[in-house]
Amino acid sequence: MIVREILALAQAKGLMIATAESCTGGMVAAALTDIPGSSAVVERGFVTYSNTAKKEMLGVSESSLTTHGAVSEQVAEEMANGALRHSAAQIAVSITGIAGPGGSEHKPEGRVCFGLARLGQPTRTETVEFGPLGRSAVRERARNHALEMIFISLNA
């Protein structure tokens, strides 16, 4: 994984990282903090599994949750922006998705929405359809994708 590179780049640029995770339950924060010295750049992680947590901890709007649903780019954007607002970080990544089992015709298993917020830049969102790979595989791939998003942002 690219975790050591992320930590080195963030430290070299003087940036702190925050995470806002739903379906991954803190896996991104865990991957970052598995490395000794990560406290120099990992500011905090929010695990906001429920809609109530998303609203209370990150300021996600009830309107977005009702209109778009928790698994949406709109909510991923609000999660990432909220992580920046409620921390001392300069870069935040968010994840919300359907790891499975289950899903629906409109929101299938394996759909994960991501947000990446960085102070002074527009927040980016994207949706990845991992497919019905099983809960563990979807969560691992979502974690890895979020780490790649941070890595790419730090190299920009």
Image (cartoon, rainbow, N blue to C red):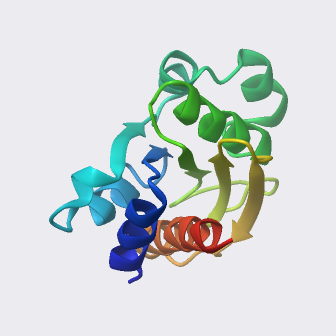
In percent of width and height, residue 62 lies at 71, 17
Quarter-of-image position of residue 46: top left
Image-based side of 8 in relation to 127, left or right: left
In percent of width and height, residue 24 lies at 43, 55
In percent of width and height, residue 109 lies at 63, 63
Quarter of the picture holding the N terminus: bottom left
The residue shown at (59%, 29%) is 82
State whether residue 137 is above or below residue 19: below
State whether residue 62 is above or below residue 45: above
Image-based side of 23 in relation to 26, left or right: right
Quarter of the picture holding the C terminus: bottom right
Q: How many marks?
A: 0
Instruction: Tell which of 47 and 85 is nearer to you.
Output: 85
Instruction: Tell which of 98 and 73 is nearer to you.
Output: 73
Image-based side of 111 in relation to 56, left or right: right
State whether residue 2 is above or below residue 25: below
